[in-house]
Image (cartoon, grey):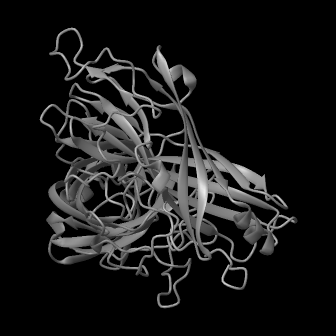
Amino acid sequence: MRGQRAALRPSRAQTRGAAIAALVALAPLLPAAAVALGSHEVDTRLPYLCTLPSGPQTATVRIRATVPDRATVGETIEAADVSTTLELPAAVAAELTALEAATVRTETTLTVGVGQNGGSTDVTWLGTAQPAAVPAEGPLTLTSTGDVPALTTGTAGDLTLTAGHLAVGLAPSKADGTPTGPASLSLSCVPGPDAEGRTLLAGIPVTAGSTGTPSPGSPSTPPTTPSSPPASSPPSSAGSSGQPSVPAGRGTAGGPAGAPREPVSASGAGKGPRVATGNAPATTARPKAPPCVTEKPTSTSLSAYITGYSNVRKLDGASLIPVSCVQLEQGEPVIDFRPDGSIHLLQKSEGSLQYQGRKQSPPFTSTFLTFGFAPTTATLVLEQAGPLVVESDVLLVFPDNIAETYIRVPLVLRVLDAEVNGTPLDVGPGCRTVTPLASPEPQPAKYPGDHLVLLGKGQLLNGTDATGYVLTSGGPLTGEVTVPAFKGCGTGGENLDRLLTAAISGPGNHIRQIQGQTCAVGVEVPTEGQCTADRQPYVVPKPER
């Protein structure tokens, strides 16, 4: 211990992601019934080496799961009953005891390599645990259960799952329930030298089915177990042979906890803001923003702020859309191996705008020259008329991973009040567009009806942060919208529908929105610099034209 007991280092950035879309994307544990009949039990114990400030410590990691013993092309491959048990030596328990810790909560992020036919990528198996007692002496054993992405493949051939890096986040508490100082700690663990050749968790034969071609090798062979790995097993580190992998930067599924990051700024979300090293960087004051508190969050809850401009083509001006709260529940991430050899990470999430308990933006005021000469000021609000859907598709192409995210939401534009040349115009309580705003839809059969469509494109270069737009890190979103005709405008027999329709409604209105870094609301050990102390998004973006 170098002459004195060293304290564990506080976590600088507990990565809990969203796998891309992150918007990086987490699913609840799959029930046992979801596993195909004829399943295979994974139960592997591996020696790991964990990095602590006091020096490296040996540990034992036990990984348990239930996986299908075989699958066909296009079939979803799901794991169930997943758990990760970490046995740390007595020295670690002693360091926690020195901090007056009586219990400790745990989060784990296990990187699992997925390989097939020479290609590979990484996914993350996430785990959390209820507070466990810190033993007065002896080893510290922590068992977590967690979130597992589903897999699909469009190609026949054995699919392999291989254990890799394990990031561990700890939240120790004193006997009275108050946090210790530091309040969060992190460990970074890798398979030890004795684990070489033993990290294979399972091999799942994937056949083409009755109408396809036979798979390479012997699809009828039982799944390979860790006790007898094939001599030619691919290395567990994705990308080591130049194959696609999910990068470990922020906004990905596989970043290690405790990775050092640079401070985040309150603007420039579209330039890939980095994770801050504290909840409130001293160099940047957080701008004011409406409340964005998620009620009853889950482990897959995200929240973020969004703001920007929308052109009003008829009025030759732009309306500032205020900082608005968006809350999301991330869907299950799916790895899709396609027949052309490409590997995609797919995720679909749903959410809503939130303002004072309603699914809407805050009210905002815009001023234009109506018909080119009359100054008109209106107070507007965007009201959500259906689900907000986020679909992310990340093409994993080593070393660059290309992300494309579509956000779809039906929004009705409501006019609360108006003033023309200084004279109030009574629009009444029901002044709104006849239908939701409408954007060109690239998939009209899948997404019928009028709704806003925003597109974000980003790139994730291995070893660096995301550029452009990725759900979890934010960035610019663009689209084009048609403003429908208005109805219900006016009081006392005065019909203002035609006036507002003539002044505002029409196609070709460009929208540019900037989304800030997300906050993983329901995470037991929150990522520093991404959330405020009361679990609201820390980053408040600035609008960009």
Question: At x 53% / y 74%, what residue is drawn?
Answer: 12
Q: Nearer the viewer, residue 85 or 259?
A: 85
- Residue 358: x and y in percent read 53, 53
Residue 298 visible in rendering: no
Question: At x 16% / y 14%, what residue is drawn?
Answer: 212
Which residue is at the far right?
176
Question: At x 55% / y 81%, what residue is drawn?
Answer: 280
Quadrant the C terminus occupies:
bottom left
Quadrant the N terminus occupies:
bottom right
Q: Nearer the viewer, residue 445 or 318?
A: 445
- Residue 440: x and y in percent read 16, 46
- Residue 195: x and y in percent read 47, 49
Residue 399 visible in rendering: yes
Q: Give the image quarter of residue 324.
A: bottom left
| Above-or-below relation of 255 to 52 | above
- Residue 306: x and y in percent read 39, 65
Q: Nearer the viewer, residue 341 or 382?
A: 341
Q: Give the image quarter of residue 474.
A: bottom left
Q: Give the image quarter of residue 503.
A: bottom left
Which residue is at the far top?
210
Does residue 541 appear to the left or right of 355 in the view shown?
Answer: left
Does residue 132 appear to the left or right of 281 in the view shown?
Answer: right
Does residue 54 appear to the left or right of 413 in the view shown?
Answer: right
Question: At x 19% / y 73%, what residue is drawn?
Answer: 317
* Number of numbered discs visible in the structure rendering: 0
